[in-house]
Amino acid sequence: MKNKVLELFGLSTYSGRSCGWKDVVKQSRCPYLNRKCVKNRKSDPDTAIGTCVVCHGVDEKRVIICPHRLLERNQIFTDCIHLLTLHEPGNELHLLGEQPVPGGNVDFFLVSPKKRKVMDFVGVELQTLDSTGTVWPERQRFLKQQGLRVKKHDADSDRKFGINWKMTAKTILVQLHHKIETFEQINKHLVLVAQDHLLDYILKEFSFDHLSTPARLGDPMHFHVYQTNEFRRSLRLELKKRYSTDAVGIATGLGLQVSAKVELDEIMTRLEKQISDETLLSIQR
């Protein structure tokens, strides 16, 4: 039977490449954080789980279950540079960790400072799918196959894991709803970085037919969708698609009332009714 753990401590489990798994597990190093894996067992906080990607479902989706897996090569931040509309040559680029904003915390800020004065910034949120149950037996069975000694009851356990699609999607959308109004009001961008499987679920289960694709630079809320592709006997994260919307778009997708922009909508409707050839502004002198 094929093991369902596809990536452990950032290393492929299916490539057939000799990784020296005993040392890998002993070091428990996360290559994406460049430090020890912070994903520990609840029953044994000193033991890192290390599972990055799993195989799930009858269609064998490659599902990322650790948000740090999205940090590969820092590509997700490179893909946000175009949203720094006030960034200029000569400015530095800085990546700051979790910061509070009205509505909650944002995972990262990509900042463009000039002489240490902030000229522009983009907020970046990471979201991967949450697992239910436990991946531990699958992990231990893989290590046993590699010749490592593991506890028999772990390797023989029939406990399984699942993917909490609905709760993951609903939670991140509610969080975005709380935060995007702040970014919209200050004319800045917020980016959600997620895997294609999660966005597919959101588009299917929620009312997001109004998302703009390709993404529009003028929208404050952007979705950067990534997929995992096989590359040199491992998995590589690559940008697949981009969407965008605004605060009202997020509220609409959640089925919430969007009274925040009623006044603006009324003004825009009134102006549109008055537009005519006679009101056209000519730049000719």
Image (cartoon, helix red, strand yellow):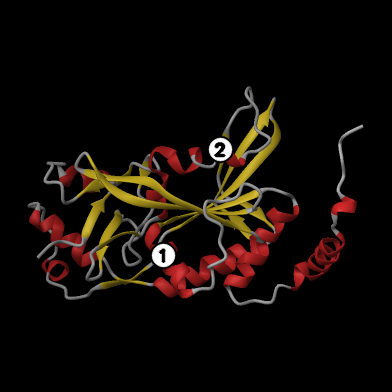
Q: Which amino acid does label 2 sit on?
A: Ile
- Pointers 2 and 1 in contact (CB under 8 A)? no
- Give the residue at x 68% y 53%: 183
For the N terminus, give its image quadrant: bottom left
Which element type, helix, strand or loop, lies under badge 2?
helix
The residues bearing labels 2 and 1 have C-alpha atoms spaced at a distance of 25 Å
**2 or 1: tag closer to the N-terminus:** 2
Which element type, helix, strand or loop, lies under badge 1?
helix
Q: In this view, does 196 lie to the left or right of 47?
A: right
Q: Which of marks 2 and 1 is in front?
A: 1
Q: Can residue 3 be seen in this view?
A: yes
Which of 109/255 is in front?
A: 255
Q: Is residue 264 left or right of residue 86?
A: right
Which of 114/283 is in front?
A: 283
Numbered label attached to residue 191: none
- Give the residue at x 54% y 73%: 207
- Give the residue at x 40% y 43%: 33
Which of 45/111 is in front?
A: 111
- Asked if residue 117 is positioned above or below residue 251 in the image, the reply reads above
Q: What residue type is labelled 1?
A: Asp
Q: Quick one: which residue is furthest to the front in this view?
A: 277
Residue 138, horizontal then vertical, whole percent: 19, 64
Residue 30, horizontal then vertical, whole percent: 34, 45
For the C terminus, give its image quadrant: top right
Which residue bears the numbered disc 1? 200
Which of 285/1 is in front?
A: 285
Q: Is residue 49 visible?
A: no
Residue 265, horizontal then vertical, whole percent: 78, 67
Numbered label attached to residue 81: 2
Label 1 neighbour load within 10 Å: few <14, some 14-19, many 20+: few
- Asked if residue 72 is positioned above or below residue 267 in the image, the reply reads above
